[in-house]
Amino acid sequence: MATSTDAQEFSSIKFDYLIIGGGTAGLAVASRLAEIPSLTIGVLEAGKSGYGDDNIDIPAYSGRALGGPYDWHFQTTPQPGLGGRTLPWNRGKVLGGSSALNYMTWNRGSKEDYNAWEELGNDGWGWDSLLSERFHPPPPSFKDNHQASYNEPNSFLGEDGPINVSYTRDFSPSHALWHATFNEVGVESNPSHLDGSNVGVWTTIVAVNPETATRSYATHYCLTPPANLHILTEALVEQVVLDKKDGEWAATGVRFSQYGKQYVASAAREVILSAGSVQSPQLLELSGVGRADVLGAAGIPLKVESPNVGENLQEHIIDPKLPHPDDLFIEEVAATAYEQYQREKSGRLTVLPCSMAYLPVSKLAPEEDVASLSSRSQQLERFGAEQTSILSSRFDTDKQLGQVEFVFDLGNWNPSFAPKEEGKRYCSMLLVLQYPYSRGSIHIDPKDGPTADGVPATAHQQPVIDPQYYVGPHGELDLEIMLHGAKFAQKICSTKPLKNVIPGPASPSSAVVSNEDLRGWIVENTITDWHPIGTCAMGGRAGQAGGVVDERLRVHGVKELRVIDASVMPLHISAHLQATVYAIGEKGADMILEDAGLRS
Ligand SMILES: Cc1cc2nc3c(=O)[nH]c(=O)nc-3n(C[C@H](O)[C@H](O)[C@H](O)COP(=O)(O)OP(=O)(O)OC[C@H]3O[C@@H](n4cnc5c(N)ncnc54)[C@H](O)[C@@H]3O)c2cc1C
């Protein structure tokens, strides 16, 4: 893996394009731009390379890197809607970014999710094949044994590309019960869940290369970088350098620090911000682009007033339910599992959560409740006519969109749950809200500056992350949808064949019966799904009044500066994010090359 930590040498290079953040989108952009040999590309990544580390590579070890040296260790502010709790918000501080930390699930939203972005005036962002993966089909017997089905021959899966996706080699014993249980309550298996509608029950594919049985992630875009691609690690970008060109602000480079020393690197063509949904808005604000009140309070001189920087934060949220498992677990012998993994690339260490189902609220709640939720969604004032119409149409029964996701996994996913019985093991039924109404924000913290000496807030400090979970009329709607989801999850856990191995509820306990109690349990147990978006959103027709970047991802009010990462999504999608983020990276790189006249 050819990266460098030589900041002195890096800052002496004359770059055409500089990319801030060597994460999921950033490395996709960098490697695509570097395909043009006449261009010189630089990437600055705050973390180290974790290439070859078992805690990143081995599928069943996913989760181990959370809270360790590859994590930014972010936290939300105390959330009134969660009883005052703060939530840890893990993000990857490592080459590959959050794609090195995630749980490897690989899926897409429904067709309507992307079409909604286009309907807002972001031309070119509708559902049209954006394939960035190389799919490895399983053998036919495997498909039947594990209900691992995808649509042939018209599958919307890539056949080329640096990211490899496949079915896991082995499955948890619980997966054999998953489809049948949903089928029993009338939910059909969906063999084409990647082709534009994810509604139904299915077996997910994952970002794992089956030949090596290891995680396939953004670093694989740049394993052997060409000579014109320079990747500097352990370099924290502190600011985008903005200079006046022909009377307008333009990005000309970045200021960064490494091991306590300050440097500048310059870009002749463009700077690209790919620091993710938490730090792309932070860096815009630190560079003088954002809300006047936020920048003023933190001591940052305002260059471009942009009211939506850091606003519009949307997050998927999880409620982990924990039924008692009976005989699902097989005895774990760690050393044997590791040996088997090394020898055969199979066994327990290749297992990931794969049991998925996405359902519309109309499958979870009585008709009158769905009508009431739809009507409440139309009365929300915040979103404007276009967004309100898109959001409320998600309750239409003919649309069949996956408003709530259900995932089953062995193990305790609930950090608030302390098992009462020593040695007792649990499994988790996760329910995940896909189209949240709650809107939060991420901003630089006025507490961090200006100090008494006039030093403003810096990139070394954590921004204020305030997702506003379950707050106000928007949040109440989210809570109601989660309530219906939680009841449905209880129904699934008490339906055969899953019921046969779950003797009874653990959390919520059997004492939690009324809606009121269940709402209380949701408030106490909701955690992040690590899917923040929207903080530098595409504004569509509304322009800067509706977002931060235009549909070609150019920052409003600043020339030669783009944002390319999860933060540009204007509305949430019903899916895990990485496939879409890679697609944003690939599409963003195409746009850069087209706009520079380097590709038609
Ligand atoms: C724990 C976890 C589990 C997840 N599970 C799944 C899953 O199973 N499936 C799925 O599809 N999605 C999952 N996701 C979501 C998905 O991984 C992310 O949405 C996606 O990777 C975000 O990509 P990004 O390019 O926007 O940001 P990132 O990949 O986070 O990249 C941002 C990069 O910028 C760097 N950076 C930030 N600030 C600076 C700075 N000032 N200077 C220099 N560098 C900087 C960061 O270190 C990082 O490398 C998960 C995410 C997490 C964290």
Image (cartoon, rainbow, N blue to C red):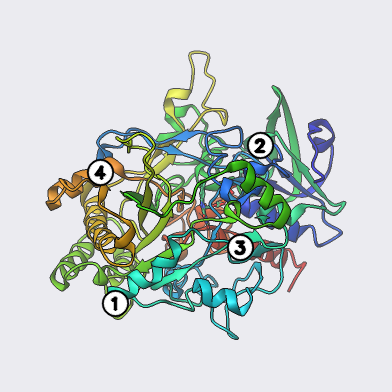
Q: Which residue is mark 3?
A: 169
Name the residue rendered at 24%, 52% in the picture.
479
Q: Which residue is mark 1?
A: 186
Q: Is residue 504 visible?
A: yes
Amino acid type shown at disc 3: Arg
Mark in the foreground, 3 or 2 = 3
Q: Which residue is mark 2?
A: 47
Towards the viewer: 4 or 260? 4
Towards the viewer: 547 or 493? 493
Mark in the foreground, 4 or 2 = 4
In the image, residue 459 sits, relative to residue 397, either above or below, namely above
Q: Residues within 10 Å of mark 1 (few under 14, many from 20)?
A: few
Q: Which residue is mark 4?
A: 523
Whole-Å distance between the Cαs marked 1 and 3?
29 Å
**Residue 366: mark:** none
In the image, residue 331 sits, relative to residue 370, either above or below, namely above
Q: Earlier in the sequence, mark 4 or mark 2?
A: 2
Element marked by disc 4: helix
Q: Earlier in the sequence, mark 2 or mark 1?
A: 2
Q: Assess whether mark 4 and mark 1 are in contact (beta carbons under 8 angstroms).
A: no
Q: Earlier in the sequence, mark 1 or mark 3?
A: 3
Mark in the foreground, 1 or 4 = 1
Q: Earlier in the sequence, mark 4 or mark 3?
A: 3
Mark in the foreground, 2 or 1 = 1
Element marked by disc 3: loop
Whole-Å distance between the Cαs marked 4 and 3?
36 Å
Residue 113 lies, in percent from the top left, at 43, 69
- Image quadrant containing the C terminus: bottom right
The CB of the residue at mark 2 lies under 8 Å from ligand 1? yes
